Amino acid sequence: MAIVELVMPKMGESIMEATILRWHKKTGDHVNLDETVLEIATDKVDTEVPSIAEGEITEVLFAENDVVPVGAVIARISTNADAAADTEPIPVAPVASEPKFTAAAAPVTANVQEVRLTGGGPRFYSPLVLTIAQQEGISFADLEKIPGSGNDGRVTKRDILQYVADRREGKIIPDVTPEQVSGPAASRAQMVTTTVSSPTYNGNVEIIEMDRMRKLIANHMVMSKQTSPHVTSFAEADVTNMVKWRDRVKGDFEKSEGEKLTFTPLFVEAIVRCIKRFPLINCSLDGDKIIIKKDINIGMATALPSGNLIVPVIKNADVLNLVGLTRQVNSLANAARQNKLKPEDTQSGTFTLTNVGTFGSLMGTPIINQPQVAILAVGVIKKRPVVIETELGDTIGIRHMMYLSMSYDHRIVDGSLGSTFLSAVAKELEAFDPKRNV
């Protein structure tokens, strides 16, 4: 009889931990090969973890809602396999082309050691850690001082609970009280300094608890605004040629390719062409280092039936033709709406497109999807009377007009580059060839 160790799978290069949502199996249960053992969640997507062997669950090492580092052993399975198998844990098959790993890659240790953050950026706190901090009345200033044993120095559930225990025993005396917190950190501190009480709400109200995804979105948006000084530029584009061309070919396109032709792949085409001309838009920051991405992976903000948003990524968009882009856009959008996105579908984005026009908005001021440095929003396409310049003089005509807006990280993208890039995208759309072949 052998013991096989089930480890927390690696969900992508930037994913260092995951939260256990629900166990499908408990200690003593029999499990088949590839049968779902538990569900986990990262800040990107939810997914199921299958069993890597047939046998009996002999030990479950973490509870639901625990945040577990990648590579940590989460359960043990007793099998009838060769005893040699228990000399080394068998990892869950990694997603895509990620390298294999074992539990030793990220051991869970009881001793908390301080790990300095790299890159000089703000510390990331999981919703679970923030909730515990809020319940225990831990100020943001004190939270920042807790040594993190997680990847990149992150504070784990175990770290903050140890801090709470030490504080109760008098081993730690907070040097900053909630009343002393002021300045730029004050707004963030309020998330964790309010002690649990029974608030009262005036008037006729309905209280709705945020779901897990909404909490993650909220945390990510606040973090983005605190990380990047946002600047938003605006432009206007006459997309009449593009609209008329699509109206003319969309029927034949669907018959020949089996895909509906939306505006999104046309927008992505224009963005990709401009990124090639302005590669600094396609980058990220690591402290004082600028990381220019050679791959062009376009994220597209997609609304879910729940009202939440997710950003699946079109990988290597620069090597896809219009048919390929259309297939990717439709496939990812459908998977998102059916909650069937894979973890790798939301990773490695280098630039994001969001279509606020889908909801009738003329324009928007989008928040950057970290660690990217820019996000472009397109508004609703509306017919308007505009001045048309011709060789015979100016005239007024009815044209299909659209506003574009782009928010960018002013640490690296100045107004000159941001505005020039946005104008270039607008000109690409205006220069659309109405006679082009699909």
Image (tube, rainbow, N blue to C red):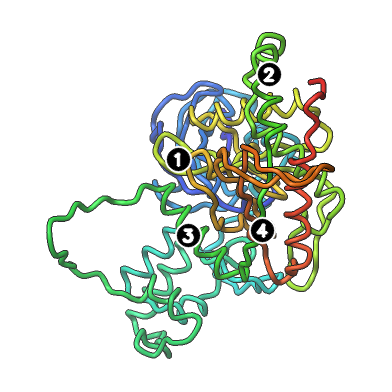
- Give, as a three-letter code, the residue at label 3: Asn
* First along the sequence among labels 4 and 1: 1
Q: Nearer the viewer, residue 373 or 30?
A: 373
Is 110 on the left-hand or right-hand side of 264? Answer: left
Dot 3 crowding, Cα within 10 Å, few <14, some 14–19, many 20+: some
Q: Which residue is mark 2?
A: 248
Q: Which residue is mark 4?
A: 371
Q: Which residue is mark 1?
A: 59
* First along the sequence among labels 2 and 3: 3
The residue drawn where x is 20% and y is 70% is: 197
Quadrant of the drawing holding the C terminus: top right
Where residue 261 sits in the image (x, y, percent)? 65, 23
Q: Which residue is mark 3?
A: 219
The residue drawn where x is 40% and y is 67% is: 161
Front tag of 2 and 1: 2
Look at the numbered discs 2 and 4 and tell me whether their residues touch, using CB distance below 8 Å. Answer: no
- How much space separates mark 2 and mark 4, taking CA atoms? 39 Å
Where residue 5 sits in the image (x, y, percent)? 57, 38
- Give, as a three-letter code, the residue at label 4: Pro
- How much space separates mark 4 and mark 3, taking CA atoms? 14 Å
Front tag of 1 and 3: 3
Placement of 254 over or under 10, stated as above or below: above
